[in-house]
Amino acid sequence: MIRVGITGQAGFVGTHLYNTLGLYPEEFERVPFEDAYFADPHRLESFVRQCDVIVHLAAMNRHPDVQVLYETNMALVRKLIGAMEANDVCPYVLFSSSTQEERDNEYGRSKREGRRLFEDWARRRGAAFTGMVVPNVFGPFGRPNYNSFIATFAYKLTHGEEPVVLQDSEVHLIYVGSLCNYICTQIRRYAGAHEPKVERDDVPFDFAMKVSEVLSRFTQFKHLYLDQGIIPPLYNRHEWNLFNTFRSYIDMTSHFPVQLIQHTDVRGSFVETVKIGVGGQVSFSTTVPGVTRGNHYHTRKMERFVVIKGKARIQLRKVGSDEVLNYYLDGDNPAFVDMPVWYTHNISNVGDDLLYAQFWINEWYDPNDGDTYFDPVEIEQEKK
């Protein structure tokens, strides 16, 4: 069991990495971290003593006073090194630097000089250190106007605003899930060798895309998916990652459930439930009254629940959050709810009759790679 701590655990990449490590409980023990530890030497020292590996993600990305940004980031590095030296511990440290290292700005300088401080510490202590130079990271739940232009575009388009391209250029992009898997691989390699090393690691990007091309794709997502409920054509994993990122900014409480158009005549009724530009798998189920299905989440798959007949309650909860979203659907008024990635979900029959439901998911089920992780939606109820 490798004990891993993440500074900046509550941030964008930190949250994703913490959750990704949680998918492998037989390999990793997560050592909790709070930003307040940097202001409390005793708690910071206790943290470093517990860790076999520390992933240093904590940093300030933006500030009106660039000198404050630079000094803050350097202070975080010095405090972490000071805590490790004060306790004579040498965990494997991975530092998240940036391709902005090469730019003439205070953020890039703080990353470049911070990486060199860690390198000096590792050489002095005979420790292991990897300075990861990371491309532009995007993914679900990033902060708009802070983490990435992709987060800003997605948020604005899903909230009735018009994004603007300030500077159009080709950008090297890495999905946050790809970065987390890359970090996990680095940790596993260190656990296998467990020897001193000091290295700069230029993390490979997933793909390159112009800023204007990202906006064009997101505009299409809005037109097809947000406005019409149509799953857009998606030709590869990178486009799925962009689409799942876009979906994560939709206001779940106001957008879902989406009502479907029901066509009725003397023969009965007809409802179009899923319009897709991609493949996938469609399933059908019946559920007896009082029974709940699901209580799991996906990290890459998209799933749609449609109630055909009966009364259902669909529940969602973002992994790591306590807030539960409840949707009540009735087959007499057909509607659907789509499951975002990293949201655990279930469906319950809350009526007196048999519940008929249809499920679409964008991948055929593979028992060797199901991307399905059990997690009860109602945590307190599970504890009781």
Image (cartoon, rainbow, N blue to C red):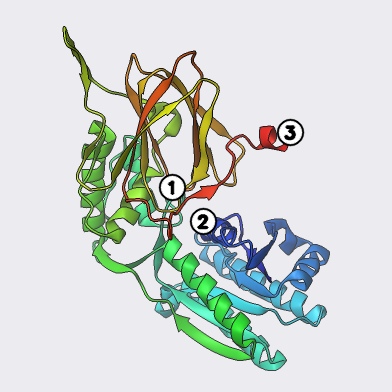
| Nearer to us: label 3 or label 1 | 3
Q: Which numbered marker is on residue 384?
A: 3
Q: Is residue 75 left or right of residue 143?
A: right
**Residue 368 seen in the figure:** yes
Q: Which residue type carries mark 1?
A: Val
Spatial CA span between label 3 and label 1 = 27 Å
> Which sits in the foreground, 204 or 265?
265
Q: Which residue type carries mark 2?
A: Phe
Residue at 25% across / 64% down in the picture? 209
Residue density around tag 2, few if under 14, some if 14–19, many if 20 or more, within 10 Å: some
In the rendered view, would you say 231 is above or below 84?
A: above
In the rendered view, would you say 238 is above or below 320?
A: below
N-term mark: 2 or 1:
2
Question: SS at mark 1?
Answer: loop
Q: Position of residue 199 (x, y in %)?
A: 53, 88
Q: Which numbered marker is on residue 341?
A: 1
Looking at the figure, which quarter contains the N terminus? bottom right
N-term mark: 3 or 2:
2
> Which sits in the foreground, 371 or 171?
371
> Which sits in the foreground, 34 or 82?
34
Q: Position of residue 82 (x, y in %)?
A: 75, 77
